[in-house]
């Protein structure tokens, strides 16, 4: 029996086998490399931060889930997302993509069930992941308004303290107020600057009927405009109807803060300027000159107190008053020239009025620009490019510089052309009035920018909190770049407590929640849904609706959202001691013992 002949492995045959093996290896490695490259291009996005965080113990139901991805997301509509707690699906809304294209927010339509939870997500590029966390059931306390609506003004009482706040849920009239402010600035400046221009450069003006008519009509329009501004502001602060806010006796309760009192003072001074505007000769009479000029000067100076009640430097008010007076006299003088002096041809006194105002305007230009620059520094510091108020202030300075250039050109024209004239001809009056009107239009643009900036809050001008009228055992000021809250608690022991929650920033807020979480195992946390939509203070009264069941360290977490997204939460801790006496609450008999305050 012969055995089969085995093939011989010659060197040539061995080389071909080795070559085939190497080629196969390179071929397979190429596919693997392509797969790795494809994986590197797509499917590598990941969550950098989230709320809830990975492995977090959630003791208070959040209003939404938020995830911040490392890379930008292109098609949020095709994102897959599921939330499961204790094998039960949690209802969610459609995912929403933030302005940065990296932040995804998903509103929750049902609450988390107690137990282990898992958030699973998948993007259209193939990226996917999960976020595990643990849910615990907590109790919730809602501060509800006295009548069940968050828009009525209430008088909450907490251990003897009464705080009046407004819900601020009235109609949005910011645009109308801004337009009225432009007319307010212009008309009050016309009274102030016009009378001072008559005093310094055109004493013959009080003998002209057109000049007297100018001051009287301006006063009537100024009073009407101021009346509407005060009424609308009172309506916003008190949430009354517009008709009821027209009653002046309702203003004192709604405008009881510093800014409101300044507004009322300005209105009273504008009304009181009737004494001067209807008899301009009083600015020349020795017996009435000082009180007349003082009246209109104080009236104009109130515009420099716009930031009163906020944390700003004292020099802000000093430079603000100087700026208001300079701009007021500048614009008021231009209005007087445009509507009276250059209204028609005339004698040499009209030329003297123009020359006299041009001499004054040089000083006014320098003071306006210098004080404006100082205000920008004091209010915005080095944030002129990073904040809206700073950018508007910078734009205002550019416009004022343009207005100053036009004024200097006008002055040069008056020096070269009017020096040889002995009377004001029709052609010259028309040319001068056109130049003055152009400068005045630029000034109105400046007033528009000023009106736009009034409700804005620059970095160096923050609302100040009102001190409580009773001592709280615990009071802490918490803030970051966009969120500022003051929390007060008393008596900081187990049992019945009272809390004061004061919002300073932002100006508007949604989903405002204060969470108190005990460190002691086995006790649920407390979530207080604060109904504030604007700046204000809310009170949780010590009537038994708010109790702390256990002593020890409690964590306080404060969250909220604005139209631009979730705010960075604030956090602190408080040590609650065991109560040694039985808790009782005394509330004034003439005040309703409700559990809420909706603040504005």
Image (cartoon, helix red, strand yellow):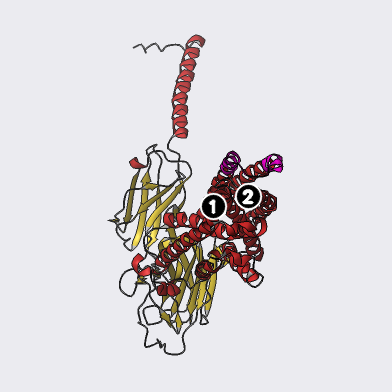
| Residue drawn 63% across the image and 48% down it | 347
Q: Is residue 150 visible?
A: no
Give, as a single range, the part of the protein colored magenta.
413-435
For image coordinates 45% across by 90% down, the residue present is 581
Which residue is tagged 1? 447
Q: Earlier in the sequence, mark 2 or mark 1?
A: 2
Which tag is nearer the camera, tag 2 or tag 1? 2
Label 1 CA crowd tier, 10 Å (few <14, some 14–19, many 20+): many
Q: Quadrant of the N terminus?
A: top left
Element class at badge 2? helix
**Residue 246 appearing in the image:** yes
Give x and y (percent) for residue 593: 35, 82
Estimate the x, y position of residue 427 in percent, counting from the top left.
58, 38
Res 79 → quadrant? top left
Main SS category, magenta section: helix
What separation in Å lies between label 2 and label 1 (alpha carbons)? 28 Å
Q: Residues within 10 Å of mark 2 (few under 14, many from 20)?
A: many
Instruction: Give the side of residue 285 with respect to residue 527, left or right.
Output: right
Residue at the (30%, 74%) spot, across then down: 147
């Amino acid at each position: 029996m012969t055995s089969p002949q085995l093939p011989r492995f010659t060197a040539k045959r061995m080389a071909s086998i080795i070559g085939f093996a190497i080629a196969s290896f390179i071929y397979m490695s190429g596919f693997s490399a392509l797969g790795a490259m494809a994986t590197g291009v797509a499917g590598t996005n990941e969550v950098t931060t989230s709320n809830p965080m990975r492995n977090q113990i959630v003791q208070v139901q959040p209003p939404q889930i938020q995830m911040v991805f490392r890379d930008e997301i292109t098609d949020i509509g095709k994102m897959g997302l599921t939330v499961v707690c204790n094998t039960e699906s949690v209802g969610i809304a459609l995912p929403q993509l933030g302005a940065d294209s990296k932040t995804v927010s998903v509103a929750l339509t049902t609450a988390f069930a107690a137990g282990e939870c898992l958030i699973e997500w998948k993007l259209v590029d193939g990226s996917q992941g999960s976020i595990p966390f643990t849910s615990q059931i907590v109790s919730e306390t809602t501060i509800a308004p006295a009548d069940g609506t968050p828009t009525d003004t209430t008088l909450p009482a907490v251990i003897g303290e009464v705080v009046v706040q407004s819900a601020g849920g009235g109609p949005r009239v910011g645009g109308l107020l801004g337009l009225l402010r432009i007319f307010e600035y212009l008309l009050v400046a016309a009274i102030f600057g016009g009378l001072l221009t008559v005093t310094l450069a055109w004493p013959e003006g009080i003998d002209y009927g057109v000049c007297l008519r100018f001051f009287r009509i301006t006063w009537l329009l100024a009073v009407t405009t101021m009346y509407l501004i005060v009424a609308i502001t009172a309506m916003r602060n008190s949430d009354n109807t517009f008709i009821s806010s027209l009653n002046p006796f309702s203003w004192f309760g709604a405008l009881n803060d510093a800014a409101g009192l300044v507004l009322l003072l300005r209105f009273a001074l504008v009304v009181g300027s009737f004494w001067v505007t209807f008899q301009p000769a009083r600015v020349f009479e020795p017996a009435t000159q000082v009180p007349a000029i003082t009246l209109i000067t104080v009236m104009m100076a109130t515009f420099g107190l716009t930031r009163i009640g906020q944390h700003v430097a004292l020099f802000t008010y000093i430079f603000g008053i100087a700026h208001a007076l300079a701009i007021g006299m500048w614009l008021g003088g231009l209005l007087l020239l445009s509507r009276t002096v250059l209204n028609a041809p005339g004698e040499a006194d009209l030329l003297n009025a123009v020359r006299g105002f041009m001499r004054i305007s040089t000083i006014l230009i320098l003071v306006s620009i210098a004080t404006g620059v100082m205000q920008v520094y004091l209010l915005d510091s080095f944030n002129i490019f990073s904040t809206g108020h700073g950018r508007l202030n910078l734009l205002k300075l550019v416009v004022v510089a343009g207005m100053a250039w036009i004024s200097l050109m006008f002055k040069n024209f008056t020096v070269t052309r009017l020096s040889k004239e002995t009377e004001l001809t029709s052609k010259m009056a028309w040319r001068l009035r056109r130049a003055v009107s152009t400068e005045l239009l630029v000034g109105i643009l400046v007033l528009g920018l000023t009106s736009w900036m009034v409700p804005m809050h620059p970095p160096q001008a923050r609302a100040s909190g009102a001190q409580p009228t009773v001592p709280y055992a615990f009071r802490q000021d918490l803030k970051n770049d966009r969120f500022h809250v003051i929390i007060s608690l008393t008596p900081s022991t187990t049992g019945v407590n009272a809390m004061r929650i004061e919002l300073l920033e932002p100006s508007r807020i949604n989903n405002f929640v204060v969470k108190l979480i005990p460190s002691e195992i086995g006790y649920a946390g407390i979530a207080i849904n604060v109904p504030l939509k604007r700046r204000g203070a809310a009170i949780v009264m010590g009537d038994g609706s708010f109790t702390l069941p256990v002593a020890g360290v409690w964590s306080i977490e404060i969250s909220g959202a604005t139209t631009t997204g979730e705010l960075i939460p604030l956090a602190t801790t408080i040590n609650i001691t065991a109560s040694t006496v039985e808790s009782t609450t005394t509330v004034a008999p003439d005040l309703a013992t409700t559990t809420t305050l909706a603040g504005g």
